[in-house]
Amino acid sequence: MIVFSAIVPHSPLLAPSIGKEHREKLTDTLNAFEALAQSLYLAKPDTIIMLSPQAPMYPDSFSGTIAPLLRGSLKEFGDHGTELPIKADFLVLDHIHRHMRESNIPFTMTSTEELDYATTVPLLFLLKHLPNTRLVPIGMSGLSAQKHFAFGEELINAVHKETRRIAIIATADLSHTASVNSPEGLTEEGMQFDKIMREKALVLDGAGMVAMDASMLEKAKQSGHKPIVVLMGCLEKLNCKAKELSYEAPFGVGMTVIRYELA
């Protein structure tokens, strides 16, 4: 059963070892993470399913990892001290795999132990008080947005069969051209992408996200569309209320924290 859901950003600058003094400009997001972590703790999840755009991606298949122990780190950003070991929930992953196979949705099992940074960064905040929570990291695919929405619809069907308490979280940065401070520069498409995605996420308009212009998605240089579309597929038929805890883009990358309160 699902007990918690949210959208979170994953900028490495959020991590103390990477962001350092720059974190002063991320106060709203950091405060939102603290509030979200408290809500997650109160939900008492046994397992977190993380939908990540930076996990290993296959052109024609979604994916999950069968490694028993997963390891998050920030080594690719020069931080060799941060380590996040977390046990995988192989049983839930196996059930998801079987359900997708029965639903004719391509799903590949990998054996990699290393977590991508988009999964690691949010978990540094969210697992502070949940040492025994297990993880199911899920990677996106090269398939269409409509296929990602359909994957989300079947993912929640699989989760409904579980007796374990499950949180589903989309880790997703928005546009990388959202302000003049972006290394990529400011674009109209970047500003529009963030505005539209936030509006549609708050009313669970997955169909509207699926229909977004492909040219806008490309020019916005975003990395959050697909995991959020999957989450919309998961939540579409549930009785839930969305609340945006923060949005900011001080370094040109749009970051939102949205919590979905489940009835």
Image (cartoon, rainbow, N blue to C red):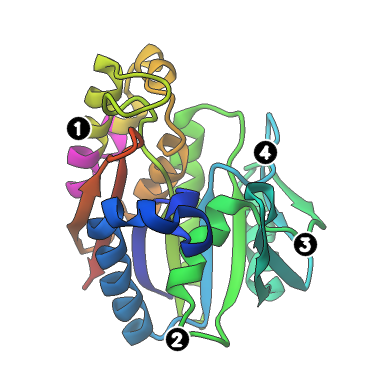
Residue at (79, 56) in percent of width and height = 112
Inter-mark Cα distance, 3 to 1: 36 Å
Q: Amino acid at mark 1?
A: Lys
Instruction: Please name the residue that numbered disc 3 is placed on.
Output: 113
Magenta-colored span = 198-208
Residue at (31, 72) in percent of width and height = 34
Give the residue furthest to the right: 111
Q: Amino acid at mark 2?
A: His
Quadrant occupied by the N terminus: bottom left
Inter-mark Cα distance, 4 to 3: 15 Å
Residue 72 falls in which quadrant of the image?
bottom right
Instruction: Please name the residue that numbered disc 1 is placed on.
Output: 195
Residue density around tag 3, few if under 14, some if 14–19, many if 20 or more, within 10 Å: some
Instruction: Please name the residue that numbered disc 4 is placed on.
Output: 57
Residue density around tag 1, few if under 14, some if 14–19, many if 20 or more, within 10 Å: some
Instruction: Please name the residue that numbered disc 2 is placed on.
Output: 129
Residue 182 falls in which quadrant of the image?
top left
